[in-house]
Amino acid sequence: MAHHAADMQTFNQEFVKCLEEMKLKRSQLQSLIQSQEEEKNNLQIEIEKMSHQLTYLNDSLTKKIAIRNEFDRAITETETAFIKILESSEILLNMLKKESVSLDQTLGSNNNDNNKQYR
């Protein structure tokens, strides 16, 4: 019977040792879980911040792109109008030159007639 009591004592000590090891592993695991939950919460906060920043940037970009497109439209219209002015100026200059030549010819012919009269 003493042999059974000694065996029982050994089993009891192993049982307590195994139970303590399991409790220690559980405690270590709980620490890891808490650490990861904290990291997860921090990441969720960062995701929310970044999501708000992304929304702000998207809105800002949309507005800026619309304004840039208005600049592009205004520049294109201005350039087109300027080209039309240049073309009109060229036509006007050509007309002025023709008129000047015509007037010079008329003046020259009139001067010839006057010179013939005074001779």
Image (cartoon, grey):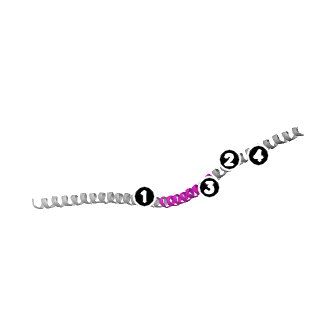
Which residue does the numbered mark 4 point to in the structure image? 19
Dot 3: what SS? helix
Chain-order first, disc 1 or disc 3: 3
Chain-order first, disc 2 or disc 4: 4
Dot 1: what SS? helix
- Residue 56: percent from left, percent from top: 52, 60
Q: Does the magenta stretch include residue 52?
A: yes
Q: Does the magenta stretch include residue 10?
A: no
Chain-order first, disc 1 or disc 2: 2
Question: Could you say which quadrant of the image residue 25 lies in?
Answer: top right
Residue at 84% across, 42% down: 8
Give the magenta part as a residue range.
38-64
In contact (CB < 8 Å): disc 1 and disc 3: no
In contact (CB < 8 Å): disc 4 and disc 3: no
Which residue does the numbered mark 1 point to in the structure image? 76
Viewer-nearest of labels 1 and 4?
4
- Residue 76: percent from left, percent from top: 42, 58
Amino acid marked by disc 1: Thr
Question: Could you say which quadrant of the image residue 78 lies in?
Answer: bottom left
Amino acid marked by disc 4: Leu
Q: Spatial distance from mark 3 to mark 2, Cα to Cα?
A: 20 Å
Dot 4: what SS? helix
